[in-house]
C-alpha cells in the first residue's frame, strides 16, 4: 500500500486534530460553535447566508445527516471548521465575489472539489482555493473535516493595492490547488495555524486582540502570495513581459484544446477576466480577436494534417480540428491557403478518397 512520504520539518494543519470526530474528542474552535444541525435544509440555508450561496445535493444517509461548524468571524475574514457526519455533495455553483481556502484535516478522508471540471482534493498537505469566476462542486466524505478561510474578494483587492500602490483590474483568480509543504503554500499553512492558535488562546482566556489583528493581516497577505492572475498582470504592467498575461493564457489554452469546443464565455472563465478586458488585450497586443486566433490555429492544424496524412477525407479533418461545418471550413481554408482542402491533399498524396 502506498504511504504518503513525510517531509521533515513540515507540520501540517491536520496533525493537531486528525480523526477528532471519530475519536470523540472536541472539534477545532469548540468554544466558538456556530451551528450544529441534523436538518440538511437548515444547513444549506445557513451555509448560503454565512459563506456562499449553495445547495446540498446527494446525501448518503439522510437520517444520519449532521453538520457541525465552529469558527470566528473576524474584521475582514471568517475562519471556520466544518464537518459532515455522512457522505454529502455540496454545490455552490459559481463563486462570484468570494475567495475560500479549504484545508483538509485527514489524509484518509480527503474532500474532493471540482473547479471548472478540474478535480482537486483538500487534505492536510493540499489546500483548495475557490475564487471568483470558477464553478465549484464538492464531495464531502463522512467525518471529513475542512478548515476554511473565507473573505470577500474586495478584501484581497484592497490589500493588494496597499502593497503595490496600484489597483488591480478584474477579479483575482487563484490556481485551484496549493501544495502546503513548500513555497507560498507553506507560508499559508503557517499563517492559518498561527491565527487558529491565537483564536483558541482567546477561548482559554488569554491572547491579544492586537496580535489577532496582525495575524489576520498576515493571513490575507499569505493568500495573496499564492499563484494567481494578479502576479501576471502586475508583471505585465511593470513591462516584464511582451503580451499581456491574459493573451498568453488564452493562446496557451486554445493551442492545447484546439480541437475541443471552445466558446468565448468559456475562455473568459478560464482566463478569469471580463469580456472587454480579453477583447482589448488581444486587439492592442495582437491586432486580432481571441476567436480569430482560434480559427487561424485550427486552419494551420488542418493544413498540416492534409499535407501529412493520406487515407482521410477533408470532412474528417475538419471535424477533428474543431470545425463543425464543412462548407465554412472549406471557404475559410481556400481564403487562407488559396486552394481547396482536397487540392492540398492531392498535391501531396494524390486524389482524396470520398
Image: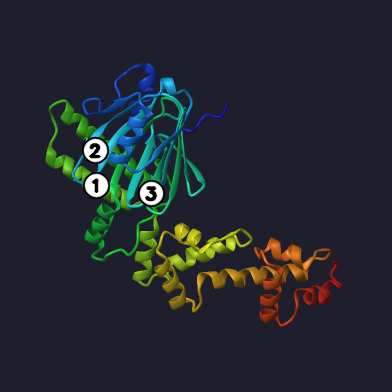
Q: Which residue is most to the top? A: 24
Instruction: Say if mark 1 contacts mark 2, CB within 8 Å.
Output: yes
Indicate whether 317 appears above or below 151. Answer: below
Tell me if 310 is positioned left or right of 215 in this view.
Answer: right
Residue ID at (34%, 62%):
170
Number of residues whose C-alpha sits closer than 10 Å to that of mark 2, classed few (under 14), some (14–19) or many (20 or more): many
In the rendered image, which quarter contains the C terminus? bottom right
Residue ID at (27%, 38%):
79
Q: CA distance from mark 3 to mark 1?
A: 24 Å
The image's colouring method is rainbow
- Residue 103: image quadrant is top left
For mark 1, give the secondary structure.
helix
Residue ID at (48%, 63%):
249
Q: CA distance from mark 3 to mark 2?
A: 25 Å
Marked residue nearer the N-terminal end (1 or 2):
2
In the rendered image, which quarter contains the N terminus? top right
Depth check, mark 3 against mark 2: the one in front is: 3
> Residue at label 2?
195
Number of residues whose C-alpha sits closer than 10 Å to that of mark 1, classed few (under 14), some (14–19) or many (20 or more): some
> Residue at label 3?
95
Marked residue nearer the N-terminal end (3 or 1):
3
Amino acid at each position: 500500500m502506498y504511504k504518503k512520504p513525510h517531509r521533515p520539518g513540515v507540520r501540517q494543519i491536520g496533525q493537531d486534530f486528525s480523526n477528532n470526530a471519530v475519536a470523540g474528542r472536541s472539534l477545532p474552535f469548540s468554544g466558538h460553535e456556530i451551528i450544529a444541525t441534523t436538518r440538511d435544509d437548515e444547513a444549506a440555508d445557513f451555509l448560503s447566508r454565512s459563506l456562499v450561496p449553495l445547495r446540498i445535493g446527494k446525501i448518503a444517509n439522510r437520517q444520519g445527516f449532521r453538520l457541525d461548524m465552529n469558527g470566528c468571524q473576524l474584521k475582514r475574514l471568517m475562519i471556520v471548521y466544518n464537518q459532515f457526519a455522512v457522505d454529502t455533495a455540496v454545490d455552490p455553483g459559481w463563486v462570484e465575489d468570494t475567495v475560500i481556502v479549504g484545508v483538509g484535516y485527514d489524509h484518509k478522508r480527503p474532500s474532493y472539489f471540482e473547479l471548472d471540471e478540474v478535480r482537486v482534493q483538500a487534505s492536510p498537505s493540499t489546500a483548495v482555493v475557490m475564487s471568483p469566476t470558477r464553478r465549484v462542486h464538492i464531495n464531502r466524505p463522512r467525518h471529513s473535516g475542512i478548515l476554511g478561510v473565507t473573505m470577500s474578494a474586495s478584501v484581497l483587492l484592497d490589500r493588494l493595492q496597499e502593497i503595490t500602490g496600484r489597483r488591480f483590474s478584474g477579479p483575482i483568480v487563484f490556481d485551484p490547488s496549493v501544495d502546503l509543504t513548500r513555497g507560498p503554500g507553506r507560508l499559508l499553512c503557517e499563517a492559518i495555524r498561527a491565527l487558529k492558535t491565537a483564536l483558541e488562546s482567546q477561548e482559554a482566556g488569554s491572547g491579544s486582540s492586537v496580535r489577532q489583528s496582525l495575524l489576520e493581516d498576515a493571513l490575507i497577505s499569505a493568500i495573496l502570495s499564492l499563484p494567481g492572475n494578479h502576479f501576471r498582470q502586475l508583471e505585465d504592467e511593470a513591462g516584464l513581459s511582451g503580451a499581456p498575461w491574459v493573451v498568453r493564457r488564452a493562446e496557451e489554452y486554445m493551442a492545447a484544446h484546439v480541437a475541443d469546443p471552445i466558446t468565448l464565455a468559456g475562455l473568459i472563465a478560464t482566463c478569469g477576466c471580463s469580456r472587454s478586458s480579453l477583447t482589448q488585450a488581444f486587439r492592442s497586443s495582437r491586432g486580432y480577436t481571441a476567436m480569430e486566433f482560434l480559427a487561424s490555429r485550427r486552419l494551420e492544424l488542418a493544413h498540416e494534417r492534409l499535407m501529412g496524412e493520406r487515407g482521410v477525407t477533408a470532412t474528417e479533418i475538419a471535424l477533428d480540428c474543431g470545425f463543425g461545418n464543412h462548407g465554412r471550413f472549406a471557404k475559410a481554408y481556400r481564403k487562407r491557403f488559396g486552394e481547396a482542402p482536397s487540392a492540398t491533399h492531392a498535391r501531396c498524396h494524390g486524389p482524396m478518397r470520398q
